[in-house]
Amino acid sequence: MDLESILAYPIKSKNICIIGYPSSGKTHLSHLLADGHHKLVHTDSYIQYGYEASMYHALEECKNTIGHVICEGVQGYRLLRKSAELSCFKWDIVIECVISRARMEMNYINERNPSKIKYLKGFITANQKVLNDYLGIIGKNKPVFLEWENTYNDVTEKQDY
């Protein structure tokens, strides 16, 4: 789907999880979707608790929210799986932000740590396995899945969230 279609999708009264690889536009999209009806939960905000605990903290934030959430971050894949394993939170919509491998590598060169490019393939493979695990756990109770291919043509200026 293009960005306009994603932004026009009916999200009121829905819990939304935005997943995607590093630098794919998850945070940018979450801010565009923020409508005053959702609490934004950024999994990266909990990284101070460590890799494993940060996911649990973000999940608790989602569970304890009165109303609905838009949750985003690289921990989103694991958050989906853990919420299904524990049957503790229901996601209505999952939006996967997709970018090309070349764009991801360019972002690491220009904005992040280029020495970490070598870990991207393993990271992508691991996240795909976690997503497949999640889909296997939820079976027919699958949320709506939307895919946004972020070509960066629709981002006119650098956003600093």
Image: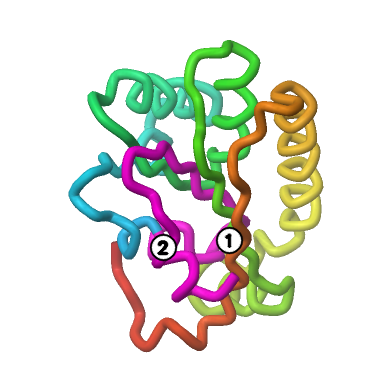
Nearest to the observer: residue 10 or residue 42? 10
Asked whether, in this view, residue 1 is left or right of residue 89, the answer is right
Q: Residue 136 at what x, y percent from top left?
A: 79, 27
Contact between marks 1 and 2 (CB within 8 A): the answer is: yes
Residue 99, located in which quarter of the rendered image?
bottom right
Question: 70 above or below 67?
Answer: below
Question: 112 above or below 49?
Answer: below
What label sits on residue 29 in the rendered view? 2
Asked whether, in this view, residue 9 is left or right of residue 148, the answer is left
Asked whether, in this view, residue 137 is left or right of residue 156, the answer is right
Q: Which residue is mark 1?
A: 97
The image's colour scheme reads rainbow
Residue at 52% from the left image edge and 43% from the top image edge: 93
Magenta span of residues? 1-29
Q: Residue 118 at what x, y percent from top left?
A: 76, 60
Q: What amino acid type should be assigned to the residue bearing mark 2?
A: Leu
Q: In whole angstroms, how far apart are the C-alphas of marks 1 and 2?
A: 9 Å
Assign a secondary structure to mark 2. helix
Residue at 42% from the left image edge and 82% from the top image edge: 155
Question: 142 above or below 56?
Answer: below
